[in-house]
Structure formats: C-alpha cells, structure tokens
Image (cartoon, grey):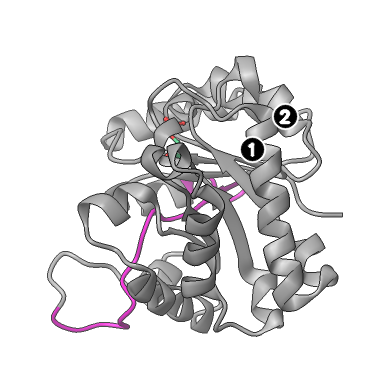
Amino acid sequence: MRKHIVAGNWKMNNDLPQTELLITDLLKQNQTSDAEVMIAPTFTNLWQAFESLRQEPIEVIAQNMHFAENGAYTGEVSASMLKSIGIKTVILGHSERRAYYNETDESLAKKVDAALANDMRVIFCFGEELADRKAGNEEAVVEGQIKNALFHLGADAFKSIVLAYEPVWAIGTGETASPEQAQDMHAFIRKTLADKYGNDVADSVSILYGGSVKPANAKEIFSKPDVDGGLIGGAALKAEDFYAIVNAF
Ligand SMILES: O=C(CO)COP(=O)(O)O
C-alpha cells in the first residue's frame, strides 16, 4: 500500500508569531484519515515549529536546501544543517524555485543526491507550464524533468523519494487540473518509473498532486487511483481548510 501524504507548503508566509498561531490551530483539528501530514514553514521558523510538534503526528519539513555540505554560499542552508535540527524531509524542485532562482534539472540532481546522502526524504516537484500543455508537450516535459534529475539513482533510492506533480498553470491560480488530467499524468509518471525501475518501484512511490487543491475539490482529486496525496499551498495556511483536505482521503 502506498502512503497517503498531505503536505502544506507555506512558501514565504507566516512570521514566527503567525507560525505559532497556525500550529496551535492545526493542533485543534481532528484527523480522521490515514494520511501522513507535513508542514513546510520558512527556514527561520523551522526549529520552533519542530519543537512545537515534536510529539505530534505532523512532520516539519523544509522548502529547499543547497547541494553543498557547507562553504561560501551566502544565504543558503545545507542538508546537514536541516538534519541537525531534526528535519528529515525536504521539498526540492518547486516551480517557483525553478522560475525565480534558476534551479535546473542538473542542480536538482545534485540536491537530490545531497539529501539522500544525508538520509533525508525528498519531495521532488515538477510540472509543465501552460504553453507546454497547449502544445501537447506536457508528458515530454514531465518525463524530461524526472529523468534528468532522478534517473541516475538506483532503485533503492526511491524508498526516500516522493513525487509531486504540480502543473505550473494550476499553482496559486485557482485553476486546478481536472481529476482526470491529474490521474492521466500520474499514471504516465508511474509508467515512466515502471519502464526504468520495474513495477515494484513504480507501485511503491507516492505521487502527490499540487495546484489549487482546496477542501471543495480534494476528495475528487484524491479519489483517483494514482493520486496518493497533495502538496498544498494557499489552503495550507488555514488550519480548517488544511485538515478538510487531510481528511479528504
Ligand atoms: O505550489 C503549490 C504547493 O507547492 C500549490 O500552491 P496552491 O495550492 O496555492 O496552488
């Protein structure tokens, strides 16, 4: 059975007092589903969030990291630094990082290696832009992003990889992929994995959907057989909405 995962990507939202308030609200919610729940606050609040949730079934994860262990990389944070405060999972390759910070398949491959070398789990994000979909190139784009950043790995490494399909045109726009579009792409991703690594690996990797998931559409999206969870942006900033999504499984 693949794990169901619902992860909240808080992006550059919530200062420390707001982070504490939202965590207090999250802890008032009731979980009725089997999903693993994660939140990704910004770097400055990771330690506080981790401490507040140490005994709770909510994992605190990071939004990004550098591929180097340490050195002259002003403004960056390494895997071992994250690990030293208890963080075990990192989001890599978010489309905002690709678009605004020049992250490429090549730099992401190095980040994935650094995370795995530090025994961290990776939520690897990818997805096509609107122009790609309009041109009918969405599968080729997604396949390229996965192959270039991940296909140097051995099959065993996929125990520590979660995939997150986030079509860029659906992020923060209010426009979601239809449940059928999400299912079609997730099935294609699983087939791409199966062709390279075999069915055992393909069937064991959780594939999350991200892009304007809301309480109103989560149930239908999560009902699709190849959708194993969600990476949630805007709706993760309200505890009731986030748990309505967590409980949509
Ligand atoms: O980018 C996302 C999660 O990483 C999705 O953001 P929204 O849910 O705000 O569309």
Q: Which mark is residue 182?
A: 1
Task: Report x, y in % for residue 247.
Answer: 72, 27
Amino acid type, residue under disc 2 in the picture: Gln
Classify 10 Å Cα crowding around label 2: few (below 14), some (14-19), many (20 and above). some
Task: Report x, y in % for residue 30.
Answer: 70, 24
At x 30%, y 54%, the residue is 97
Asked if the residue at label 2 sits under 8 Å from ligand 1, the reply is no
Does 214 appear above or below 131? above
Please state the extent of the stretch shown in magenta in the rendering. 51-72
Q: Nearer the viewer, residue 176 or 79?
A: 176
58 in the magenta segment: yes
At x 56%, y 30%, the residue is 177
Q: Nearer the viewer, residue 51 or 98?
A: 98
| 197 relative to 116 in the view: left or right | right
Residue 207 appears in the rendering:
yes
At x 47%, y 72%, the residue is 149
Q: Nearer the viewer, residue 117 or 192?
A: 192
7 in the magenta segment: no
Q: Secondary structure at mark 2?
A: loop
Q: Report the magenta stretch's main SS.
A: loop
Task: Report x, y in % for residue 141.
Answer: 47, 57
Instruction: Check the image and name the residue furthest to the front.
Output: 135
At x 31%, y 71%, the residue is 66
Residue 56 appears in the rendering:
no
Q: Which residue is mark 2?
A: 31
